[in-house]
Image (tube, rainbow, N blue to C red):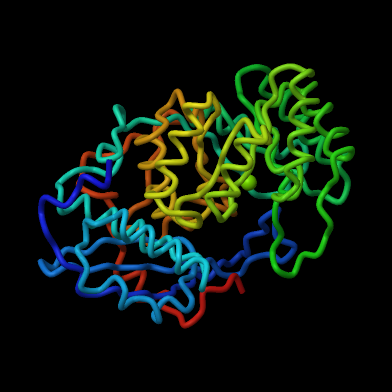
């Protein structure tokens, strides 16, 4: 649908990239990172057109992108398909440049005076959320978190594995299940698909994942996320076929998968039930809109990873509302695990945090992605680096 845009012409005149770091005191002990995080980095991309409109994106760090900016400046802002094709080439040569795609969609929406979810063909701006927790807590504390989430209106929650002993992980999950009964849908993230650069632990193999999967299935888990390395296609297909015999548990993954052919291989080889590529890290809204429709058409769920700041959450919500809706996504990730991961921390680049009401979020009718930056906060957190320490 984006190829049809361009009725209102507007030329790109500038691309500005800034890095920011929010100090985290106390630190944030993310379960998938062996090092507690003392800073939360955010890279903000602004694309300005000749009429002074500014589109905003965020997500990956955009290191080295300056060398490629000239291939976008002077071009028609709304030519999103052409930009996406060039960004795919930049990704091959440099890094993940997709925050610019988000900024271009935000700008195109302002030019067209349409919210992105509607530009993508969405019929409803409301999505159902799952609270995506991050911290390893004791069993009783995690059960208490689940009870509080129910009080806040959440009907689904993702629990993190990755403690030194899987038995401890399973004990926590069992405590949560016994606290919430069938009032909550539970997901489990095994975080075996990729590692932080300093984490050299080996991923699980099929037999290890299978032994965990049987336990998860017996506790009524809705999806098992990243049980194997991202490139273990054979293992995922084998695990998924075994898990199917257990009942209704799904296999989820592909949150940082980079290339379109990799995503399509996962689809063609029957590796996953739930596809989670994140638009701010992978192919942008342009590439994932097409892939998301393929996933939904094949009868699977499309529900992006959104772990990052509020701009990334918003971009992925627009994408999901636009191409999958509640039926095709079922639940969308809402990073939330206070006090360590509060909305104030998560959404610090925004003038006010995004709001969930009754476990749901409703996107506005504002043109573009509807991003309102907290310029004073961005000035205070300006940094030369985009690292976690
Ligand atoms: Mg994950």
Residue 161 lies left or right of residue 164; in this view the side is left
Q: Position of residue 257 (x, y in %)?
A: 59, 52
Q: Quadrant of the N terminus?
A: top left
In this view, 361 is above or below 343: above
Residue in view at x 77 percent, y 24 percent: 217
Residue 178 picture quarter: top right
Residue 121 lies left or right of residue 188; in this view the side is left
Residue 219 lies left or right of residue 370; in this view the side is right
In this view, 52 is above or below 70: above
Residue in view at x 31 percent, y 32 percent: 122
In this view, 349 is above or below 62: above
In this view, 148 is above or below 96: above
Pick the residue in front: 36 or 209: 209
Residue 145 seen from this side: no
Residue in view at x 73 percent, y 48 percent: 136
Q: Position of residue 34 (x, y in %)?
A: 75, 62
Q: Quadrant of the C terminus?
A: bottom right
């Amino acid at each position: 649908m984006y190829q049809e845009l361009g009725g209102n012409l507007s030329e790109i005149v500038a691309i500005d990239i800034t890095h920011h770091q929010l100090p985290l005191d106390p630190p944030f002990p993310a379960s998938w990172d062996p090092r507690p995080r003392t800073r939360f980095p955010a890279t903000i991309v602004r694309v300005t057109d000749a009429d002074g409109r500014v589109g905003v994106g965020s997500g990956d760090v955009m290191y080295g992108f300056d060398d490629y900016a000239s291939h976008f400046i002077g071009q028609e802002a709304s030519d999103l398909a052409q930009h996406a094709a060039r960004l795919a080439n930049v990704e091959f040569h440099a890094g993940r440049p997709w925050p610019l795609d988000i900024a271009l969609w935000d700008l195109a929406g302002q030019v067209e005076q349409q919210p992105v979810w509607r530009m993508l063909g969405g019929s409803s701006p409301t999505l159902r959320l799952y609270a995506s927790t991050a911290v390893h807590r004791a069993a009783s504390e995690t059960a208490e978190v689940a009870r509080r989430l129910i009080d806040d209106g959440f009907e689904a929650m993702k629990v993190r594995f990755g403690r030194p002993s899987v038995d401890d992980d399973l004990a926590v999950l069992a405590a949560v299940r016994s606290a919430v009964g069938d009032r909550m849908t539970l997901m489990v993230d095994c975080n075996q698909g990729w590692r932080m650069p300093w984490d050299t632990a080996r991923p699980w193999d099929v037999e290890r994942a299978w032994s965990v999967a049987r336990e998860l299935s017996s506790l009524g888990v809705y999806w098992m996320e990243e049980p194997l390395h991202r490139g273990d296609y054979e293992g995922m297909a084998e695990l998924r076929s075994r898990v199917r015999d257990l009942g209704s548990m799904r296999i989820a993954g592909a949150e940082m998968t980079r290339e379109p052919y990799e995503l399509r291989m996962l689809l063609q080889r029957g590796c996953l039930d739930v596809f989670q590529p994140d638009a701010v890290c992978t192919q942008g809204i342009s590439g994932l809109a097409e892939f998301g429709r393929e996933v939904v058409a094949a009868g699977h769920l499309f529900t992006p990873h959104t772990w990052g700041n509020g701009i990334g959450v918003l971009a992925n919500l627009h994408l999901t509302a636009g191409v999958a809706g509640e039926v095709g996504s079922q639940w969308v990730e809402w990073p939330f695990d206070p006090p360590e991961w509060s909305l104030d921390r998560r959404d610090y680049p925004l003038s006010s945090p995004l709001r969930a009401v009754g476990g749901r979020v409703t996107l506005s009718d504002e043109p573009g992605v509807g991003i309102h930056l907290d310029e004073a906060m961005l000035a205070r957190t300006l940094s030369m680096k985009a690292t976690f320490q």
